Image (cartoon, helix red, strand yellow):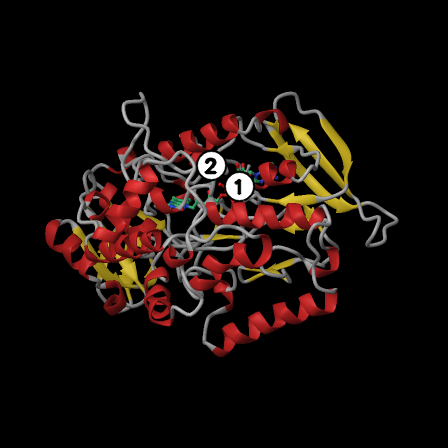
Amino acid sequence: MAAARELRREGHAVTVMEQSADVGGQWLYDPRTDGDDPLGAAVPVRVPGSMYACLRLISPREAMGFSDFQFLPRHGVAGRDPRRYPVHREMYSYLGDFCDAFGLMDAVRLNTRVLRVAETMPSSPSTRQWAVRSVHLGDGNEKEEVFDAVVVATGHYSQPKLPRIKGMEEWLRRQMHSHWYRTPDSFGGEVVVMVGCGDSGKDIALDLRRVAKEVHLTAKSTEEAMTPAMSKMLANHANLHLHPQIDQLHADGRVVFADGSSVVADTVMYCTGYTYSFPFLDTGGAVTVDDNRVGPLFEHVFPPSLAPSLSFVGVPRKVLIPWFFEAQGKWVAQVLSGRRALPPVEEMLRSVEEHYRAREAAGVPKKYTHDIGGVEPLKMYEFGEKYCDFPRIENWQRELILSGIAGMNEDMENFRDRTDDSDNVRKGLQRWLGLAAPPQAQDDQNVSGKDTAAIEVDVQAMAKLLVN
Ligand SMILES: Cc1cc2nc3c(=O)[nH]c(=O)nc-3n(C[C@H](O)[C@H](O)[C@H](O)COP(=O)(O)OP(=O)(O)OC[C@H]3O[C@@H](n4cnc5c(N)ncnc54)[C@H](O)[C@@H]3O)c2cc1C
């Protein structure tokens, strides 16, 4: 929807195809699960939603909203959650408000799944067009239409990523991916082993421990996992435990950990994140997904050989959303209208290769290719300004993000309700609350490219923002 608005603003005719019955993406909570496919092995998964019922945001509302339509609290409005870190439904409602405010819904075809996107033939870079085949999930009618450009904005929190663990195939009891998890109801009295100790793993463990007999978290490195927040969780809840990773699952229900200890479990839940998946996209190999690297993509948006008529909005991880995606959408819209030019194809490819090389040299695994906020947070802050005159985030907002992350590492259960804002944040907040549409940030309030002391803090702190 962020991209759709920017495309319209730039004068393009836009059609949004959405397979669900409403907009909102992951924020449209879906109580259904993939039924008999708890590991989410089918591609694509049948139910795209991965949100669980108890989820509260881990990013502060003040720092993530659209640049000109802030995520302001709506006190006293029924069904709304005015807190800084609201429940997931609040984000869904905000996105609905956004669509209403900008009259976007008339561009949207709901219950419409895209089955195939492929270039029409013959083509040349200047006359490139795309055939889009879609199906209406209500009446089953399929149709194929031709578009001048396609923006892929299908997210990356639907298709489970599973580890390979010895004995997974022999395990006869319940195993599932967190994609399948909604509520703790069916875990009453169970012993549950969680694989993965990221934000979702910890969050779901805290939800489960209320009804489960025992919840066993596992981590690749128990030293790294033992943050102050983890120590508090373990100290506060006698039925929560932390172990090294699983060595083997046994058919009789035994789960043996790397240190030789074991438990007999009822359920193994994989909180191991998600993988990029574009089963509908046929680029003849021009864009591939390999170990969670979608590429090549210039600045995570344009595949050089197919740009600008094919683009991706929403690939980066650990970024502020929808704020960052708004900037990406604006850039795509302006490039498509010819207001901005892309570098030549060779230069874009070189830039992608340089990005890969720099990440490799820094020891960043390939699977984190699109992790911007956690590795190069300044790039997240500077991207919009560099490519489409997008306003920078203000310093108080950045401070708020950092204090939220620090709080999360200290106390996972209570950080969302802390009220100890600094003076700087309080002042920024006052301005923000008093404005329907905040002004463009002032230079002295902005993140400066030369703010090197802050960079290191950001790099360390942002690395912990969002699991996947
Ligand atoms: C459990 C969980 C907790 C999270 N917590 C936070 C948080 O606290 N803070 C935060 O900032 N982010 C959080 N996120 C991440 C956040 O949800 C995503 O960053 C955000 O939803 C991405 O938006 P998107 O529009 O790119 O993708 P999505 O929200 O995934 O939307 C993609 C849309 O594309 C549709 N689609 C996919 N394929 C097709 C197709 N073939 N045809 C038609 N439509 C299709 C889907 O139905 C979906 O509506 C969380 C995610 C999860 C899963």
- State the residue in front, 6 or 124: 6
Residue 228, x across and y down, in percent: 18, 61
**Type of the residue with mark 1:** Val
Q: Which residue is mark 1?
A: 45
Residue shown at the point (53%, 54%) measured from the top left: 384
Q: Nearer the viewer, residue 209 or 307?
A: 307
Q: Quadrant of the N terminus?
A: top right
Ligand 1 within 8 Å of the CB at mark 1 = no
Quadrant position of the C terminus in the picture: bottom left
Q: Position of residue 70 (x, y in %)?
A: 41, 38
Residue 74 spot, x, y in % from top left: 32, 28
Q: Is residue 439 left or right of residue 216?
A: right
**Which residue is tagged 2?**
34
The answer to whether any part of residue 354 appears in the image is: yes
Q: Is 307 drawn above or below residue 225 in the view shown?
A: above
| Disc 1, SS | loop
Q: Residue at x 40, y 33 (%)?
A: 436
Amino acid at circle 2 = Asp
Q: Is residue 252 visible?
A: no
> Dot 2: few (<14), some (14–19), or many (≥20) neighbours within 10 Å?
some
Q: How many marks?
A: 2
Q: Would residue 209 be found to the left or right of residue 319 on screen?
A: left
Q: Secondary structure at mark 2?
A: loop
> Does 190 sit left or right of 251 as displayed?
left
